Protein backbone atom coordinates (compact mmCIF):
# COMPACT_ATOMS: atom_id res chain seq x y z
CA UNK A 1 0.00 0.00 0.00
CA UNK A 2 2.79 2.41 1.01
CA UNK A 3 6.26 1.82 -0.31
CA UNK A 4 9.25 3.95 0.65
CA UNK A 5 12.47 3.32 -1.24
CA UNK A 6 15.88 4.86 -0.61
CA UNK A 7 14.87 8.30 0.61
CA UNK A 8 17.38 10.80 2.01
CA UNK A 9 16.43 14.00 3.82
CA UNK A 10 18.76 16.79 4.88
CA UNK A 11 18.29 19.69 7.30
CA UNK A 12 20.94 22.07 6.01
CA UNK A 13 24.11 20.02 6.43
CA UNK A 14 22.60 17.39 8.68
CA UNK A 15 21.83 14.13 6.96
CA UNK A 16 18.68 13.31 8.95
CA UNK A 17 17.37 10.34 6.95
CA UNK A 18 19.76 7.94 5.27
CA UNK A 19 18.59 5.59 2.50
CA UNK A 20 15.41 4.61 4.29
CA UNK A 21 13.28 1.88 2.70
CA UNK A 22 10.23 0.20 4.15
CA UNK A 23 6.69 -0.72 3.29
CA UNK A 24 3.25 -0.92 4.80
CA UNK A 25 0.77 -3.43 3.42
CA UNK A 26 -2.99 -3.03 3.36
CA UNK A 27 -4.53 -3.92 6.73
CA UNK A 28 -1.28 -3.92 8.70
CA UNK A 29 -0.13 -2.03 11.73
CA UNK A 30 3.52 -1.21 11.12
CA UNK A 31 5.65 0.59 13.66
CA UNK A 32 8.88 2.56 13.42
CA UNK A 33 10.60 2.57 16.77
CA UNK A 34 13.76 4.31 17.85
CA UNK A 35 15.21 6.82 20.26
CA UNK A 36 14.56 10.54 20.21
CA UNK A 37 16.26 12.09 17.19
CA UNK A 38 16.44 8.86 15.18
CA UNK A 39 14.50 10.54 12.37
CA UNK A 40 11.08 8.99 12.86
CA UNK A 41 9.06 12.21 12.59
CA UNK A 42 11.10 13.34 9.61
CA UNK A 43 10.09 10.16 7.79
CA UNK A 44 6.39 10.75 8.43
CA UNK A 45 6.65 14.41 7.43
CA UNK A 46 8.44 13.42 4.23
CA UNK A 47 5.65 10.97 3.40
CA UNK A 48 3.10 13.70 4.15
CA UNK A 49 4.86 16.04 1.72
CA UNK A 50 6.13 18.63 4.21
CA UNK A 51 9.69 17.67 3.23
CA UNK A 52 10.88 16.19 -0.03
CA UNK A 53 13.59 13.66 -0.70
CA UNK A 54 15.85 14.29 -3.68
CA UNK A 55 16.51 10.59 -4.10
CA UNK A 56 14.48 7.41 -4.01
CA UNK A 57 10.73 7.24 -4.25
CA UNK A 58 7.57 7.07 -2.20
CA UNK A 59 4.62 5.17 -3.63
CA UNK A 60 1.11 5.07 -2.26
CA UNK A 61 -1.32 2.59 -3.83
CA UNK A 62 0.94 2.37 -6.86
CA UNK A 63 1.17 6.15 -7.35
CA UNK A 64 4.39 8.07 -6.91
CA UNK A 65 3.74 10.73 -4.26
CA UNK A 66 7.26 11.88 -3.35
CA UNK A 67 6.89 15.18 -5.21
CA UNK A 68 3.35 16.06 -4.06
CA UNK A 69 2.48 18.95 -1.70
CA UNK A 70 0.82 17.99 1.63
CA UNK A 71 -2.76 18.75 0.58
CA UNK A 72 -2.51 16.40 -2.39
CA UNK A 73 -1.02 13.61 -0.28
CA UNK A 74 -3.88 13.94 2.19
CA UNK A 75 -6.45 13.89 -0.59
CA UNK A 76 -5.16 10.45 -1.62
CA UNK A 77 -6.14 9.09 1.80
CA UNK A 78 -2.92 9.42 3.77
CA UNK A 79 -3.45 11.36 7.00
CA UNK A 80 -1.07 12.12 9.86
CA UNK A 81 -1.54 12.74 13.57
CA UNK A 82 1.56 14.86 14.17
CA UNK A 83 3.98 14.68 17.05
CA UNK A 84 2.91 16.85 19.98
CA UNK A 85 -0.70 16.68 18.68
CA UNK A 86 -0.52 20.22 17.22
CA UNK A 87 -4.20 20.88 17.61
CA UNK A 88 -5.37 24.41 16.86
CA UNK A 89 -5.39 25.64 20.45
CA UNK A 90 -7.41 28.81 19.85
CA UNK A 91 -10.19 27.06 17.94
CA UNK A 92 -13.05 25.10 19.42
CA UNK A 93 -13.04 21.30 19.43
CA UNK A 94 -15.59 21.25 16.64
CA UNK A 95 -13.64 23.73 14.52
CA UNK A 96 -10.56 21.55 14.90
CA UNK A 97 -12.52 18.59 13.63
CA UNK A 98 -13.91 20.65 10.77
CA UNK A 99 -10.33 21.54 9.84
CA UNK A 100 -9.61 17.81 9.75
CA UNK A 101 -12.33 17.44 7.12
CA UNK A 102 -11.02 20.40 5.14
CA UNK A 103 -10.50 18.43 1.92
CA UNK A 104 -13.86 16.63 2.11
CA UNK A 105 -17.03 17.82 0.37
CA UNK A 106 -19.09 20.01 2.70
CA UNK A 107 -22.07 17.65 2.62
CA UNK A 108 -20.12 14.79 4.20
CA UNK A 109 -18.72 16.72 7.15
CA UNK A 110 -21.75 16.40 9.43
CA UNK A 111 -21.84 12.60 9.16
CA UNK A 112 -18.10 12.32 9.80
CA UNK A 113 -18.42 14.61 12.82
CA UNK A 114 -21.04 12.25 14.25
CA UNK A 115 -18.74 9.25 13.64
CA UNK A 116 -15.88 10.93 15.47
CA UNK A 117 -18.13 12.01 18.36
CA UNK A 118 -19.39 8.45 18.66
CA UNK A 119 -15.86 7.12 18.88
CA UNK A 120 -14.75 9.90 21.27
CA UNK A 121 -17.73 10.80 23.48
CA UNK A 122 -15.48 13.12 25.50
CA UNK A 123 -15.01 15.31 22.45
CA UNK A 124 -18.75 15.41 21.93
CA UNK A 125 -19.26 16.73 25.47
CA UNK A 126 -16.69 19.42 24.80
CA UNK A 127 -17.45 20.36 21.24
CA UNK A 128 -17.75 24.10 21.94
CA UNK A 129 -14.76 24.23 24.28
CA UNK A 130 -11.54 25.97 23.19
CA UNK A 131 -9.15 23.16 22.28
CA UNK A 132 -6.19 24.68 24.15
CA UNK A 133 -8.00 24.11 27.45
CA UNK A 134 -8.38 20.33 26.98
CA UNK A 135 -6.27 17.90 28.99
CA UNK A 136 -3.36 16.12 27.30
CA UNK A 137 -5.33 12.92 26.75
CA UNK A 138 -8.29 14.80 25.34
CA UNK A 139 -5.98 16.72 23.03
CA UNK A 140 -4.57 13.45 21.73
CA UNK A 141 -8.10 12.19 21.10
CA UNK A 142 -8.87 15.44 19.30
CA UNK A 143 -5.75 15.11 17.17
CA UNK A 144 -6.77 11.56 16.23
CA UNK A 145 -10.38 12.51 15.61
CA UNK A 146 -9.22 15.40 13.48
CA UNK A 147 -7.13 13.08 11.30
CA UNK A 148 -10.04 10.64 11.01
CA UNK A 149 -12.22 13.43 9.62
CA UNK A 150 -10.21 13.09 6.40
CA UNK A 151 -11.36 9.43 6.11
CA UNK A 152 -7.82 8.15 5.58
CA UNK A 153 -7.12 4.66 4.29
CA UNK A 154 -3.66 4.88 5.90
CA UNK A 155 -3.30 6.69 9.21
CA UNK A 156 0.14 7.74 10.40
CA UNK A 157 0.49 8.40 14.13
CA UNK A 158 3.54 10.18 15.51
CA UNK A 159 4.21 9.46 19.20
CA UNK A 160 0.58 9.25 20.29
CA UNK A 161 1.65 8.19 23.81
CA UNK A 162 3.95 11.16 24.38
CA UNK A 163 3.46 12.87 27.73
CA UNK A 164 0.43 10.80 28.72
CA UNK A 165 -0.20 8.91 31.96
CA UNK A 166 0.01 5.08 31.62
CA UNK A 167 -3.75 4.64 31.88
CA UNK A 168 -4.29 7.10 29.04
CA UNK A 169 -1.59 5.41 26.97
CA UNK A 170 -3.55 2.14 27.32
CA UNK A 171 -6.68 3.96 26.20
CA UNK A 172 -5.00 5.52 23.16
CA UNK A 173 -3.61 2.15 22.08
CA UNK A 174 -7.03 0.58 22.53
CA UNK A 175 -8.37 3.19 20.12
CA UNK A 176 -5.57 2.36 17.67
CA UNK A 177 -6.64 -1.32 17.81
CA UNK A 178 -10.26 -0.35 17.21
CA UNK A 179 -9.37 1.84 14.23
CA UNK A 180 -7.34 -1.01 12.82
CA UNK A 181 -10.19 -3.46 13.36
CA UNK A 182 -12.47 -1.03 11.50
CA UNK A 183 -10.24 -1.35 8.44
CA UNK A 184 -7.69 1.46 8.71
CA UNK A 185 -4.09 0.62 7.92
CA UNK A 186 -1.75 2.15 10.46
CA UNK A 187 1.84 3.39 10.46
CA UNK A 188 2.85 4.06 14.05
CA UNK A 189 5.93 5.93 15.21
CA UNK A 190 6.76 5.45 18.87
CA UNK A 191 9.40 5.81 21.53
CA UNK A 192 7.31 3.56 23.76
CA UNK A 193 8.61 0.41 22.07
CA UNK A 194 6.85 -1.97 24.43
CA UNK A 195 3.39 -0.64 23.58
CA UNK A 196 4.16 -0.19 19.90
CA UNK A 197 5.51 -3.72 19.44
CA UNK A 198 2.62 -5.24 21.31
CA UNK A 199 0.07 -3.68 18.97
CA UNK A 200 1.95 -3.90 15.66
CA UNK A 201 2.25 -6.65 13.05
CA UNK A 202 5.69 -5.64 11.84
CA UNK A 203 8.35 -3.23 13.03
CA UNK A 204 11.40 -1.33 11.86
CA UNK A 205 14.07 -0.11 14.29
CA UNK A 206 15.71 3.23 13.52
CA UNK A 207 19.04 4.54 14.74
CA UNK A 208 20.42 7.96 13.72
CA UNK A 209 18.53 8.06 10.47
CA UNK A 210 19.06 4.46 9.40
CA UNK A 211 16.98 1.31 9.66
CA UNK A 212 19.07 -1.17 11.66
CA UNK A 213 16.57 -3.96 12.18
CA UNK A 214 13.21 -5.12 10.89
CA UNK A 215 10.85 -8.02 11.35
CA UNK A 216 7.57 -9.22 12.83
CA UNK A 217 6.77 -7.18 15.95
CA UNK A 218 6.38 -10.30 18.11
CA UNK A 219 9.91 -11.42 17.21
CA UNK A 220 11.47 -8.04 17.87
CA UNK A 221 9.71 -7.98 21.22
CA UNK A 222 11.71 -11.12 22.12
CA UNK A 223 14.97 -9.97 20.56
CA UNK A 224 17.77 -9.43 23.08
CA UNK A 225 19.24 -6.38 21.38
CA UNK A 226 15.84 -4.68 21.15
CA UNK A 227 15.05 -5.58 24.73
CA UNK A 228 18.25 -4.07 26.05
CA UNK A 229 18.23 -0.98 23.84
CA UNK A 230 14.54 -0.04 23.81
CA UNK A 231 12.72 -1.94 26.49
CA UNK A 232 15.06 -1.06 29.34
CA UNK A 233 16.03 -4.59 30.22
CA UNK B 1 -21.30 74.83 24.29
CA UNK B 2 -18.93 75.88 21.51
CA UNK B 3 -16.33 73.65 23.11
CA UNK B 4 -18.71 70.70 23.20
CA UNK B 5 -19.64 71.01 19.54
CA UNK B 6 -15.95 71.31 18.59
CA UNK B 7 -15.25 68.22 20.63
CA UNK B 8 -18.10 66.35 18.99
CA UNK B 9 -16.95 67.37 15.51
CA UNK B 10 -13.43 66.26 16.34
CA UNK B 11 -14.69 62.90 17.59
CA UNK B 12 -16.46 62.42 14.26
CA UNK B 13 -13.23 63.38 12.48
CA UNK B 14 -11.33 60.96 14.66
CA UNK B 15 -13.73 58.12 13.92
CA UNK B 16 -13.51 58.92 10.22
CA UNK B 17 -9.72 58.83 9.99
CA UNK B 18 -9.70 56.01 12.55
CA UNK B 19 -11.89 53.94 10.24
CA UNK B 20 -9.38 54.41 7.44
CA UNK B 21 -6.48 53.44 9.73
CA UNK B 22 -8.45 50.42 10.88
CA UNK B 23 -9.07 49.18 7.32
CA UNK B 24 -5.36 49.49 6.53
CA UNK B 25 -4.33 48.01 9.89
CA UNK B 26 -6.44 44.93 9.13
CA UNK B 27 -4.21 44.24 6.13
CA UNK B 28 -1.05 44.53 8.23
CA UNK B 29 -2.45 42.28 10.91
CA UNK B 30 -3.80 39.59 8.59
CA UNK B 31 -0.53 39.30 6.71
CA UNK B 32 1.49 39.27 9.91
CA UNK B 33 -0.80 36.62 11.35
CA UNK B 34 -0.24 34.34 8.37
CA UNK B 35 3.42 34.73 7.43
CA UNK B 36 4.88 36.83 10.28
CA UNK B 37 5.80 39.61 7.87
CA UNK B 38 5.49 43.31 8.63
CA UNK B 39 4.49 44.18 5.10
CA UNK B 40 5.82 47.72 4.82
CA UNK B 41 4.71 47.88 1.19
CA UNK B 42 1.10 47.70 2.38
CA UNK B 43 0.80 51.48 2.77
CA UNK B 44 1.88 51.96 -0.82
CA UNK B 45 -1.03 49.85 -2.03
CA UNK B 46 -3.19 52.75 -0.78
CA UNK B 47 -1.19 55.10 -2.97
CA UNK B 48 -1.57 52.85 -6.02
CA UNK B 49 -5.31 52.67 -5.37
CA UNK B 50 -5.48 56.46 -5.21
CA UNK B 51 -3.67 56.83 -8.53
CA UNK B 52 -6.01 54.33 -10.17
CA UNK B 53 -9.00 56.36 -8.97
CA UNK B 54 -7.40 59.60 -10.14
CA UNK B 55 -6.39 58.21 -13.51
CA UNK B 56 -9.68 56.49 -14.27
CA UNK B 57 -11.70 59.58 -13.35
CA UNK B 58 -9.61 62.28 -14.99
CA UNK B 59 -8.21 60.43 -18.03
CA UNK B 60 -10.96 57.92 -18.78
CA UNK B 61 -13.88 59.84 -17.31
CA UNK B 62 -15.18 56.86 -15.40
CA UNK B 63 -17.97 57.15 -12.85
CA UNK B 64 -16.58 57.44 -9.27
CA UNK B 65 -18.06 54.09 -8.29
CA UNK B 66 -16.44 52.28 -11.23
CA UNK B 67 -13.17 54.07 -10.54
CA UNK B 68 -13.26 52.78 -6.98
CA UNK B 69 -14.09 49.24 -8.12
CA UNK B 70 -11.25 49.39 -10.62
CA UNK B 71 -8.89 50.60 -7.87
CA UNK B 72 -9.96 47.68 -5.67
CA UNK B 73 -9.37 45.23 -8.52
CA UNK B 74 -5.94 46.63 -9.43
CA UNK B 75 -4.80 46.80 -5.79
CA UNK B 76 -5.97 43.26 -5.10
CA UNK B 77 -4.08 41.97 -8.11
CA UNK B 78 -1.00 44.00 -7.18
CA UNK B 79 -0.99 42.62 -3.62
CA UNK B 80 -1.18 39.04 -4.89
CA UNK B 81 1.52 39.62 -7.51
CA UNK B 82 3.87 41.24 -4.98
CA UNK B 83 3.48 38.23 -2.71
CA UNK B 84 4.09 35.73 -5.52
CA UNK B 85 7.05 37.55 -7.03
CA UNK B 86 8.80 39.04 -4.00
CA UNK B 87 7.76 37.18 -0.84
CA UNK B 88 6.91 33.61 -1.85
CA UNK B 89 10.48 32.77 -3.00
CA UNK B 90 11.69 33.80 0.48
CA UNK B 91 9.27 31.62 2.42
CA UNK B 92 12.00 29.55 4.06
CA UNK B 93 14.47 32.44 4.39
CA UNK B 94 15.07 34.35 7.62
CA UNK B 95 12.30 36.79 8.45
CA UNK B 96 14.69 39.72 8.20
CA UNK B 97 15.18 39.04 4.46
CA UNK B 98 11.44 39.20 4.02
CA UNK B 99 11.21 42.49 5.93
CA UNK B 100 14.01 44.08 3.89
CA UNK B 101 12.29 42.92 0.70
CA UNK B 102 9.04 44.54 1.83
CA UNK B 103 10.83 47.83 2.41
CA UNK B 104 12.41 47.46 -1.04
CA UNK B 105 9.01 46.96 -2.66
CA UNK B 106 7.78 50.05 -0.84
CA UNK B 107 10.66 52.13 -2.28
CA UNK B 108 10.07 50.61 -5.71
CA UNK B 109 6.40 51.60 -5.74
CA UNK B 110 6.95 55.10 -4.35
CA UNK B 111 9.82 55.92 -6.67
CA UNK B 112 8.26 54.16 -9.64
CA UNK B 113 5.12 56.27 -9.34
CA UNK B 114 7.19 59.39 -8.85
CA UNK B 115 9.04 58.56 -12.06
CA UNK B 116 5.86 57.97 -14.03
CA UNK B 117 3.54 60.63 -12.64
CA UNK B 118 5.93 63.15 -11.09
CA UNK B 119 6.40 64.09 -7.46
CA UNK B 120 3.54 66.57 -7.28
CA UNK B 121 0.13 65.79 -5.84
CA UNK B 122 -2.75 65.06 -8.21
CA UNK B 123 -6.15 66.49 -7.40
CA UNK B 124 -8.84 63.83 -7.43
CA UNK B 125 -12.37 64.93 -8.40
CA UNK B 126 -15.15 64.64 -5.84
CA UNK B 127 -15.89 61.00 -5.08
CA UNK B 128 -18.75 61.30 -2.65
CA UNK B 129 -20.95 64.37 -2.50
CA UNK B 130 -23.92 65.13 -0.32
CA UNK B 131 -25.26 67.46 2.33
CA UNK B 132 -23.61 68.15 5.66
CA UNK B 133 -25.82 67.15 8.55
CA UNK B 134 -26.17 69.27 11.65
CA UNK B 135 -26.62 67.51 14.95
CA UNK B 136 -26.76 69.71 18.03
CA UNK B 137 -24.35 72.29 16.69
CA UNK B 138 -21.87 69.76 15.34
CA UNK B 139 -21.68 68.82 11.70
CA UNK B 140 -21.19 65.49 9.94
CA UNK B 141 -20.32 65.45 6.27
CA UNK B 142 -21.62 62.83 3.85
CA UNK B 143 -18.09 61.43 3.21
CA UNK B 144 -17.68 60.99 6.97
CA UNK B 145 -20.98 59.15 7.23
CA UNK B 146 -20.17 56.95 4.24
CA UNK B 147 -16.73 56.19 5.67
CA UNK B 148 -18.18 55.10 9.00
CA UNK B 149 -20.94 53.09 7.35
CA UNK B 150 -18.69 51.30 4.87
CA UNK B 151 -16.17 50.49 7.60
CA UNK B 152 -18.79 49.01 9.90
CA UNK B 153 -20.16 46.85 7.06
CA UNK B 154 -16.66 45.68 6.09
CA UNK B 155 -15.75 44.85 9.69
CA UNK B 156 -18.88 42.77 10.16
CA UNK B 157 -18.34 41.04 6.83
CA UNK B 158 -14.70 40.31 7.56
CA UNK B 159 -15.48 38.95 11.02
CA UNK B 160 -18.08 36.60 9.54
CA UNK B 161 -15.67 35.54 6.82
CA UNK B 162 -12.89 34.71 9.27
CA UNK B 163 -15.09 33.10 11.91
CA UNK B 164 -17.71 31.27 9.90
CA UNK B 165 -16.37 30.24 6.51
CA UNK B 166 -14.16 27.37 5.47
CA UNK B 167 -11.59 29.75 4.01
CA UNK B 168 -11.59 31.88 7.16
CA UNK B 169 -11.02 28.79 9.28
CA UNK B 170 -8.12 27.85 7.03
CA UNK B 171 -6.63 31.33 7.52
CA UNK B 172 -6.86 30.98 11.29
CA UNK B 173 -5.38 27.49 11.14
CA UNK B 174 -2.43 28.66 9.02
CA UNK B 175 -1.79 31.57 11.37
CA UNK B 176 -1.78 29.25 14.38
CA UNK B 177 0.32 26.42 12.97
CA UNK B 178 1.24 26.41 9.30
CA UNK B 179 2.60 22.85 9.32
CA UNK B 180 -0.47 21.40 11.02
CA UNK B 181 -2.74 23.31 8.64
CA UNK B 182 -0.87 21.76 5.71
CA UNK B 183 -1.38 18.31 7.21
CA UNK B 184 -5.14 19.07 7.27
CA UNK B 185 -5.00 19.60 3.52
CA UNK B 186 -4.84 23.39 3.46
CA UNK B 187 -3.02 24.66 0.39
CA UNK B 188 -0.97 27.40 2.01
CA UNK B 189 -0.15 29.11 -1.28
CA UNK B 190 -3.85 29.68 -1.91
CA UNK B 191 -4.44 30.82 1.66
CA UNK B 192 -1.53 33.27 1.60
CA UNK B 193 -2.61 34.67 -1.79
CA UNK B 194 -6.15 35.10 -0.51
CA UNK B 195 -4.88 36.93 2.57
CA UNK B 196 -2.87 39.35 0.46
CA UNK B 197 -5.83 39.83 -1.89
CA UNK B 198 -8.15 40.61 0.99
CA UNK B 199 -5.72 42.97 2.72
CA UNK B 200 -4.99 44.83 -0.51
CA UNK B 201 -8.68 45.16 -1.37
CA UNK B 202 -9.29 46.69 2.06
CA UNK B 203 -6.39 49.09 1.50
CA UNK B 204 -7.97 50.20 -1.79
CA UNK B 205 -11.31 50.80 -0.08
CA UNK B 206 -9.45 52.78 2.58
CA UNK B 207 -7.78 54.73 -0.21
CA UNK B 208 -11.12 55.67 -1.78
CA UNK B 209 -12.53 56.71 1.60
CA UNK B 210 -9.42 58.79 2.25
CA UNK B 211 -9.76 60.51 -1.14
CA UNK B 212 -13.39 61.31 -0.41
CA UNK B 213 -12.18 63.75 2.28
CA UNK B 214 -8.60 64.59 1.27
CA UNK B 215 -8.82 64.64 -2.50
CA UNK B 216 -5.13 64.35 -3.36
CA UNK B 217 -2.94 61.53 -4.61
CA UNK B 218 0.85 61.69 -4.29
CA UNK B 219 3.60 59.06 -4.53
CA UNK B 220 4.42 59.18 -0.83
CA UNK B 221 0.86 59.49 0.54
CA UNK B 222 0.89 55.84 1.56
CA UNK B 223 3.94 55.97 3.77
CA UNK B 224 2.62 58.10 6.65
CA UNK B 225 -0.87 56.62 6.38
CA UNK B 226 0.65 53.15 6.32
CA UNK B 227 2.92 53.87 9.28
CA UNK B 228 0.02 55.12 11.38
CA UNK B 229 -2.05 52.08 10.45
CA UNK B 230 0.93 49.95 11.42
CA UNK B 231 0.96 51.67 14.83
CA UNK B 232 -2.76 50.94 15.06
CA UNK B 233 -2.15 47.25 14.32
CA UNK B 234 0.58 47.07 16.99
CA UNK B 235 -1.58 48.94 19.49
CA UNK B 236 -4.46 46.52 18.97
CA UNK B 237 -2.15 43.50 19.02
CA UNK B 238 -0.59 42.56 15.70
CA UNK B 239 -2.21 39.44 14.27
CA UNK B 240 -5.53 40.22 15.99
CA UNK B 241 -8.32 41.44 13.70
CA UNK B 242 -10.55 42.96 16.41
CA UNK B 243 -7.34 44.53 17.71
CA UNK B 244 -6.62 46.16 14.36
CA UNK B 245 -10.15 47.57 14.27
CA UNK B 246 -9.89 48.92 17.81
CA UNK B 247 -6.33 50.18 17.32
CA UNK B 248 -7.32 52.12 14.20
CA UNK B 249 -10.20 53.86 15.93
CA UNK B 250 -8.08 54.70 19.00
CA UNK B 251 -5.31 56.20 16.86
CA UNK B 252 -7.83 58.25 14.87
CA UNK B 253 -9.51 59.51 18.04
CA UNK B 254 -6.19 60.30 19.71
CA UNK B 255 -5.16 62.44 16.74
CA UNK B 256 -8.49 64.24 16.71
CA UNK B 257 -8.47 64.92 20.45
CA UNK B 258 -4.96 66.30 20.28
CA UNK B 259 -6.22 68.63 17.53
CA UNK B 260 -9.27 69.55 19.61
CA UNK B 261 -6.94 70.57 22.41
CA UNK B 262 -5.32 73.00 19.99
CA UNK B 263 -2.11 70.97 19.66
CA UNK B 264 -2.54 69.79 16.08
CA UNK B 265 1.20 70.15 15.33
CA UNK B 266 1.68 67.26 17.80
CA UNK B 267 -0.72 64.98 15.95
CA UNK B 268 1.91 62.73 14.36
CA UNK B 269 4.09 62.85 17.46
CA UNK B 270 1.29 61.53 19.64
CA UNK B 271 0.74 58.53 17.34
CA UNK B 272 4.38 57.50 17.56
CA UNK B 273 4.45 58.20 21.30
CA UNK B 274 1.61 55.67 21.55
CA UNK B 275 3.76 53.16 19.65
CA UNK B 276 6.66 53.67 22.05
CA UNK B 277 4.43 53.34 25.11
CA UNK B 278 2.77 50.17 23.77
CA UNK B 279 6.11 48.57 22.97
CA UNK B 280 7.38 49.41 26.46
CA UNK B 281 4.30 48.57 28.50
CA UNK B 282 2.31 45.98 26.58
CA UNK B 283 4.14 44.74 23.50
CA UNK B 284 1.43 42.20 22.73
CA UNK B 285 -1.05 45.07 22.28
CA UNK B 286 -4.53 45.68 23.68
CA UNK B 287 -6.22 42.52 22.38
CA UNK B 288 -3.27 40.39 21.35
CA UNK B 289 -3.00 38.23 24.43
CA UNK B 290 -0.50 35.45 23.85
CA UNK B 291 -2.38 32.33 24.87
CA UNK B 292 -0.75 29.55 26.80
CA UNK B 293 -0.80 26.30 24.95
CA UNK B 294 -0.64 22.93 26.60
CA UNK B 295 1.79 20.41 25.18
Image: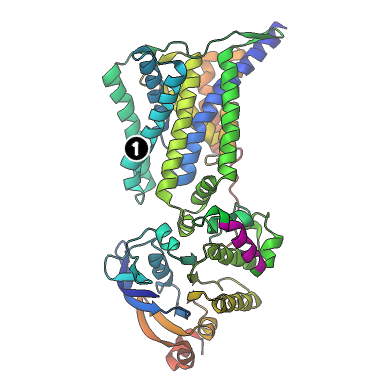
In which image quadrant can residue A40 be found? bottom left
Other residues around mark 1 within 10 Å, as few (<14) / some (14–19) / many (≥20): some
Q: Which SS does the magenta portion mostly show?
A: helix
- Residue B103: quadrant of the picture: top left
Q: Is residue B24 visible?
A: yes
Colour scheme: rainbow
The residue located at (35%, 65%) in the rendering is A65
Whole-percent x and y of residue A7? 31, 71
Residue A121 in the image: above or below residue B32: below
What residue is shown with label 1? B81
Q: Which sits in the foreground, A232 or B119?
A: B119
Please state the horizontal and vertical placement of residue B237, each as a whole percent of the image. 56, 39
**In this rendering, is residue B295 above or below B187?**
below
Q: Please tell me whether residue A116 belongs to the stretch shown in magenta.
A: yes
When the figure is inspected, residue B232 is found, relative to residue A214, above or below; the finding is: above
Magenta residue check for B90: no
Q: Residue at point 31% right, 16% down?
A: B119
Report the front residue among B288 and B181. Answer: B181
Left or right: A6 in relation to B163? left
Q: What residue is rendered at 56% in x and 45% in y?
A: B165
Q: Spot the residue most to the front.
A: A107
Which image quadrant: the N terminus of chain B? top right
Magenta stretch bounds: A108-118
- Residue B204, position in %: x, y? 45, 27
Q: In this image, A137 relative to B128: left or right?
A: right
Amino acid sequence: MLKVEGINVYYGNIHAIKEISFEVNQGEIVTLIGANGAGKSTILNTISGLYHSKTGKIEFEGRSIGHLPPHKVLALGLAQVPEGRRIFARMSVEENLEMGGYTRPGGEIAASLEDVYQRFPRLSERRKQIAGTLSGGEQQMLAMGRALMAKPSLLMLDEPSMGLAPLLVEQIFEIIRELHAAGTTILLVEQNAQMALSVADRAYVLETGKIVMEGPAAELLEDDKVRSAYLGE
Amino acid sequence: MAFLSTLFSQIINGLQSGSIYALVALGYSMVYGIIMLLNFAHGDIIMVGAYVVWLSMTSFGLHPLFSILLAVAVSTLLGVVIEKVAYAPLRSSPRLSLLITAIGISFLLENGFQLIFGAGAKVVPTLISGPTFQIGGASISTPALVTLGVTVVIMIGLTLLVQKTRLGRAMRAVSEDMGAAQLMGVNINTTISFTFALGSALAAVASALYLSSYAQASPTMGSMLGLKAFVAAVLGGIGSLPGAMLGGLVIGLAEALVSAAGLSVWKDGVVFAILIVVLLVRPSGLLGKPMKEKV
